[in-house]
Amino acid sequence: LLPTLFETPNLTPIAQEQSYAVNTSKGTNRAFQRARKVVFRNYYQPSPDITTSTTAKPRSLFWSGLSDHSQKTQPSSQLQNKALFSVASNQTSQQKNMISTNKKGKSYKQTPTPAQQKLAQHSYQEHQQKSCAAIGYHTEAVPSLLISQSKDVNLLSSEDMNNDDDDNNEEDDKRLDAVHFVLQLLCLLGTAQWHLGQFHSKKAIEFFQQLSDDQYHTGWVLNQVGRAYFSMADYSNAIRALQLMEQVEPHRMAGLQVLSTALWQTKREVELSNLAQRVTDFDRLAPEVWCVVGNCFSLQKEHETALVFFRRSIQLDRSFTYSHTLSGHEYFANEDFEKAIGCFRDAIQADERHYNAWYGLGAVYYRQEKFDLAEYHFHKACTINPQSSVLICHLGMAQNANGKPFESLDTLQAAFRLDPHNPQAHYQRSLVFQALERYEEALVELSKVRDAAPREAQIHFAMGRLHKRLGRTDKALRCFLDALDLDPKDTNLIKSAMEKMDEPDVEEEISAF
């Protein structure tokens, strides 16, 4: 057998049924070793695409007998898997070569010509044959899996590539548009919220109004808009925004304390009572609910009952600053100034930027005629919220009482720039002009207040006093009669002023009204 093997130039494997002719039980001689090397060199060269760290193992039982029995042969299934992997990787590399880049760096798919498709198909089949031969299969004995895969190789046509490219571009455009929309929305909301935190209420409202209708008509945005209007003392627009918030999100409790205070300021008793009834039926564990109920009783002048509900709100949330502030106002109405000061200080301890508490402390000190402290606390409130005409007006009032009339006029002028129709500012300017003995200017300011509040008897009485000082007896008498018609309870004070028409004017107490 051995001479036959060496004389044959193209060695062929011996059939398995003749394997009994080889006896390997007693070792091998030098010629047998050379024969085995020749057989390995001619028949078992690994495929270039399959990288193995060990020598390829024989494909049949006969050639496995020629190898050392101490070494374990590699299963043929692993070689088959490697060949399949090589085929798949070659197919993937061919498809990747069809993708190139343009000058701008964007990838696009080239359209293969028919010649390129035929060449790729031929190279794929040739590579498949080599891989199958390496694992011991002849071309006619290729497994059905490889044959089905070779038939299913599809090179993308130009139309399919263009369609995929268009779909990818559309998806990328949609994704970019969505990201741009979200970033623009967050930027707009953040800018508006920053202005609201700085109490630049007009700018905050302008940014909120730039939102789309779907974003604007949400509970959170409407709550912020209502707060902005409320900080500007625009109670009608604040009520409109917060009521719309309640319609959009009936379950939302945040913001209802501001709505109830705005209703309290405008004296809308029926709407406030209806709101208190609805919120107590919905949620009794929210601190905002008991603020609403407390405001309802406060409007009815039942201050003790209102304090009970405000304390209940504080029990639910001790950090809820609004409840502390409203409790302080109720103690102030009962003239319990020490407890009022304690409540306002608790509110400031919870939130030092809560300007309502600073205003409350200023009002208490003004009532106690501690004008220096009143001016300080009013100024602190105006520093936190410089856009409130009401706060600036009270600061001017404290400055006038503290003996600073000219500073008071400048401060009240700033209040006019914020709200030209603020009647309280006109009234305080009239008092400053009276202190400076500028009666004509004081009379002009009081006439504007009368146009804004024609049923206030106090204004008509003050105008009568000014006409009397200017020597206009007829106009003074007419103003006193109008005050008597509007407030018949204070007939003694008005009749006393009418009887002293010919006497020199003295300082009467207007605060009796």
Image: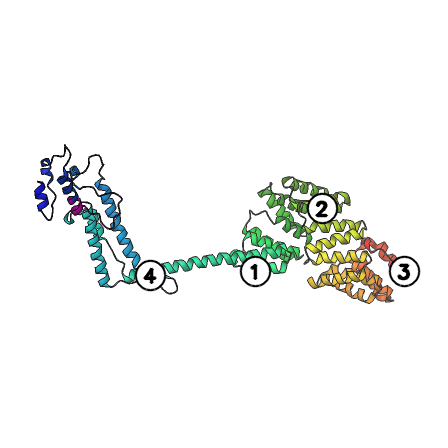
Taking the image as shown, residue 303 lies to the left or right of residue 175, namely right
Tell me how far mark 2 sits from mark 1, CA to CA: 34 Å
Mark 3 or 2, nearer chain start: 2
Residue found 23% across the figure and 47% down from its top: 83
Helix, strand or loop at mark 3: loop
Label 1 belongs to which residue?
Answer: 209
Badge nearest the viewer, 1 or 3: 1
Tell me how far mark 4 sits from mark 1, CA to CA: 48 Å
Tell me how far mark 4 sits from mark 2, CA to CA: 72 Å
Tell me how far mark 3 sits from mark 2, CA to CA: 45 Å
Front-most of residues 290 and 15 = 15
Tell me how far mark 1 sits from mark 3, CA to CA: 58 Å
Helix, strand or loop at mark 4: strand
Label 3 belongs to which residue?
Answer: 500
User: Please, what is the dominant secondary structure of the magenta stretch?
Assistant: loop
Helix, strand or loop at mark 1: loop
Q: Which residues are magenta?
A: 38-56
Label 2 belongs to which residue?
Answer: 344
